[in-house]
Image (spheres, rainbow, N blue to C red):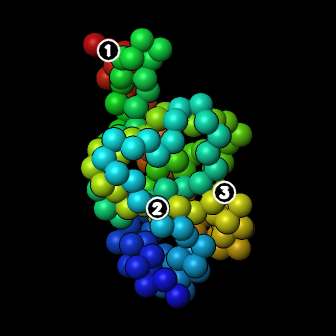
Amino acid sequence: MNDEAIRALTAVPYFAGVNTALIETIARHTTRREYDAGQVVFLEGEPEVAIYIVQQGWLKAAKISSDGREQVLHFLGPGEVFNAIGVFVEATNPATVIALEPVIVWVIEKHVILKLLDDHPELARVVIRRLAGRVQQLVSMVEDLSLR
């Protein structure tokens, strides 16, 4: 059993209310990755089929234009989950994610998360709730940008 993964997952609000046995199951299917400051986790347009959970450090998700202009979509810190939408749609990454400092993330591959959701409806409800919250945040961002 990966105790570090269990501790990391338990500290994530995304999984609040998920029982200990299910957290242990998820932990068995995670991979730990480390990134240095400035290192790209993934690029916009690349296929990426995993959910990332931030244990330590800060990252940014940004759109970068062909002339180098940058629109930061979101700063990601400890306890946050990113790229969840990419697991459920057949699309490439909508943004580039870059480590702002040394980062530790836990990764759950698409096929694993889909199987876990099939087997554990309570986890599916948690994920749906979190994705809906993210959609609300993005709608607010669009409203803010369009009303400037």
Label number found at residue 120: none
Q: Position of residue 31 (x, y in %)?
A: 54, 67
Residue marked by disc 2: 33
Residue occupying image coordinates x 71% and y 73%: 119
Cβ atoms under marks 1 and 3 closer than 8 Å = no
Label number found at residue 147: 1
> Mark 1 is on which residue type?
Leu
How far apart, in angstroms, are the residues tagged by discs 1 and 3?
36 Å
Q: Position of residue 87 (x, y in %)?
A: 63, 50
Looking at the image, tell me whether mark 2 or mark 3 is earlier in sequence order.
2
Residue occupying image coordinates x 31% and y 62%: 56
Residue marked by disc 3: 110
Q: Secondary structure at mark 2?
A: strand
* Residue depth check, mark 2 versus mark 3: number of the one nearer the observer: 2
Badge 2 crowding class, 10 Å Cα cut-off, few under 14, some 14 to 19, many 20 or more, is few
Looking at the image, tell me whether mark 1 or mark 3 is earlier in sequence order.
3
Whether residue 76 is situated above or below residue 56 in the rendered picture:
above
Whether residue 78 is situated above or below residue 123 in the rendered picture:
above
Q: Position of residue 112 (x, y in %)?
A: 67, 66
Give the quadrant of residue 26.
Answer: bottom right
Residue occupying image coordinates x 52% and y 88%: 1
> Mark 2 is on which residue type?
Arg
Q: Secondary structure at mark 1?
A: loop
Q: Position of residue 69 (x, y in %)?
A: 36, 17
In the image: residue 77, left or right of residue 51: left
Residue occupying image coordinates x 53% and y 83%: 24
How far apart, in angstroms, are the residues tagged by discs 2 and 3?
16 Å
Q: Visible in this render: residue 19?
A: no
> Mark 3 is on which residue type?
Lys
* Residue depth check, mark 2 versus mark 1: number of the one nearer the observer: 2
In the image: residue 86, left or right of residue 76: right
Badge 3 crowding class, 10 Å Cα cut-off, few under 14, some 14 to 19, many 20 or more, is some
